[in-house]
Amino acid sequence: MKLQTNKLRKYKQFSLRGLNVIDITILISVILITVFAVHQIGSLITKLVVGVIIVSLGGLLILKEPKHKTRIYLVIYRMLVHLLRQKLFTKNKLGNFNTKTLLNLKNFEDNFLKLSLSKDNTSYALALEVFGKDITINKFEEQEVYYQKLTQAFANLNDKIFIVKIPEFVSLEENIKSLETLKVDENMQALKNAWKSDLETLDTYEKVDKYYVVMVSSNKNELYHGIKNLQARLFQTEIFSKMLNKLDFLKMLNKVYRFGNEFSEEELIDMLDKNNLNEIFAFDKVLFKKNYFKTDNVFNSIQTISEYPLRLKQSWIIDTFKSNSMIIWSLNPVSEKHKERILNRAEQNLEEIKEEVQNRYKKRKITKDQDALNELSESLVSGEDQLFESSFILVNRAFNLEDLKAQQKENEENIKSWKGVVNNLKYRQFDAYSAMLFKNTDMLKEYTEQLSTNIGFAWVFHNQYFNDKFFSIIGNSNYNGNSPIFFDQGINNGRRNNFNMFILGTSGSGKSTFAKKLIAPKIAKKDKVIVLDPQSEYSKSLMQLGAVKINLGTNADVAFNPLQIRKIFNPDSSLSILTRNSELLTLNENALMKWFKIIYPHFNEDHIILLRSAIRKVWEKHFKDIDQDLSTLSNDQYPIMSDLINELEQEEPSPEISKVLKHLKVDFQEKGQYHHLYNKTTNVDLSSNAIIFDTSALMKSSSELFNGAFYLIISFIQGLISNRENKDNSKIWILIDEAHMFIDERNESTLDFIFTTVKEGRKFNCGTIITTQNPQDFTKTQNIIQKGQAILENCQYSVLLKCKSETINEINKLFKNSGGLSELEQNFLAFASVGQGILIVDSSEKIAFDAYYNQEEKRLFFDKGDLRIYD
């Protein structure tokens, strides 16, 4: 940031007691008038009285009027101009008093808007819609990079631009369409109705700030290259934009000029090829008053910023843009020749003023002005910056004077918060109206010279509106005017290339509730949803939406056959049956050996080799006459653990075989701990669209039993995912809740399996959601940290909810490869309320949010009531 100068034209040469040449000229004129007047009077006393009166009245003229912050004579001049000027314009009048003469719109030539001030003064405009970016929670060093890049975008401008901020009602037409396409079952109807109610409410009442940049030039070719260059530089700043075609440009003009009297989209389409847009956009009646003007039935007023503090803070413009007013920021690059002239004159005048001023306080203020001017000059001479004539037009619009004044007051308070000064432009609303038009000329002349650094560091495009055109709101933005966030995890584009998500949050942070909220729309869309639920937190909610619950436990009537052949993201379906089956057997054999190591961690490599040899023999006997894909057989066509035990019994006895057989017989035969679960034909029906595997009963078992069951379930799920290849465009979603419970530092096979699911699943339209409240379990060893980071790197999205201070360091370790957490992010998470968090879409897009739940979602998902309500 650089020091901010005052308006350079205010550094006028003083000749006497702070008076400039005009002031002294008026004083001399008053004295001459006084001399002439008293000369005609005979009585000395009368001469004195008249002289004193004239001099007093004349002296008042050079006093400063506090509200206008200028000399009284200038206020009187403006008042006279206002009184003498035509104030009423109507569409049926002829000549200069027609409302059409107030505009400068001509017609479109392709996407170029032709602007005409006169027959000999024609220019063109192109426009961008700019999508804001919130960097509030980024690291300070990251923010600095963004500021510098935006500064460079402005520094390379050669043509005048207008940055336009328009508060617009949220358009949720596409979101509503996405909801209307849902064909839901009866058990989802209440939730669909609640989503519909949310959308209808927001579509009516919610406003967001939209940003546009209009560039103006007399040369169409230079204009096109100029705006494309600006667009490219904004992209480098990770600020995205799109060039407006002529219909979109017309829609923008409709918002700028026709507030309260907007044309419909059908009417705008009819206007596209009209030759005189002035005729169309002109109001029926415009009436200018001293403090406002009226366009048909709408009250309008325009304010500007007349003074800036010496030191501007980063993102200094944000408070100003909180207003409900339309704001047009005009930035006109100053030519090299003009720079030399105004800077030379300003520096000379300041030096002379400082010499004349005796008051030490005023002298210090002048010294600071000189410091700012020197810094400005040095920056320009070194080529670091571009200088702009910068002026703000704050356009207030309302249907009554009371609301109009409220807007004006809000602007005054917002600008005062960063020590700026507002000018309400009394008697100058006509000139102000002219300034809000996209002209190369400036009748208002209320600009202040600003460097591109100070403009870039304002971070004008700060309001980030996140809308994936989805029907469910995940929350409201904390730092963007509470704007709603519509997030679709299933989007696949250039920036977002997988569906995986990692959710972190301490116990009681709202983590599982938020996961339910994410899952419900997926069930509504009839995507395949599988939930691994180790704490029985999802059954009550999701079963009301049609999900099927499968209880897993040693005594449950559920069986998974470990010897069943499953696709494990391989092999290639284009291979021959023989080659494909060979690869299938190898992959399943390796997976089975890892499973044995989980349930029998004391088995050594000799024991594993024995098991590997035996399983090959079992499969060879069972599959020797089969010439079809082995993963497509019916469940009862696969061998079971008893067949493996029988095969081992036929081997030549040895201590190793005896040990293996001893464990397998005790655990897998009748009354063994694994008999019901693993020594039967698979009897689990995975055809339902939504399945919850409730593993809470296994939590009381040994870690070997629990992790073994989890590993086997995941392997079956991987087979399910692989079998969906090329079937349709629907997605499959795997939610692994409290994933830290499945991490065993003694055996990392389960963690490897999670990584494989996350990495390979996206090839099959699969998205994995992983939640945990103990990130420290992902940082137990260096090897686990690396695997945890690898999982994170393959997750497009992360959601960070409230965390304890002591766990934030562990989160930083996990996020080390992506830059870690900023200080602001850490503070936000440490002090977040229930349901508040940060959505990380990618490294350049992070949104602090407060989760939103409608009444139906609260009924479904809030098992303990709304914990966000405080007394």
Image (spheres, helix red, strand yellow):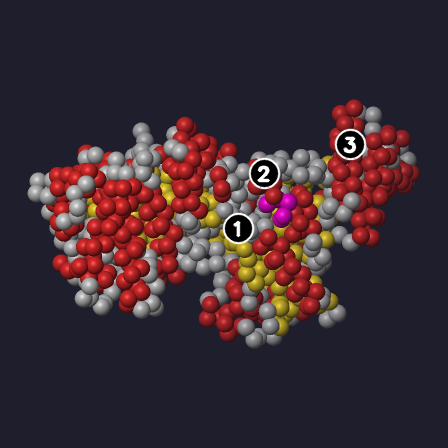
How far apart, in angstroms, are the residues tagged by discs 1 and 2?
20 Å
Please give the name of the residue rendered at 78% of the width and 54% of the height, measured from the top-left corner.
335
Question: How many angstroms separate mark 3 from mark 1 (CA)?
Answer: 38 Å
Instruction: Please tell me which residue is depicted at 62% across the width and 36% down the height of the picture.
Output: 313
Residue 132, numbered label: 1
Please give the name of the residue rendered at 17% of the width and 48% of the height, measured from the top-left corner. 651
- Per the image, the residue denoted by label 3 is 366
Mark 2 or mark 3, earlier in chain: 2
Q: Is residue 860 visible?
A: no
User: Under tag 3, what secondary structure?
Assistant: helix
Residue drawn at 19 percent across, 62 percent down: 623
Q: Earlier in the sequence, mark 3 or mark 1?
A: 1
Checking the image for residue 620, the label placed there is none
Q: Nearer the viewer, residue 310 or 51?
A: 310
At mark 2, the secondary structure is helix
Q: Which residue is mark 2?
A: 141
SS assignment for the magenta stretch, majority: helix
Magenta region: which residues? 146-150
Structural distance between the alpha carbons of marks 2 and 3: 33 Å
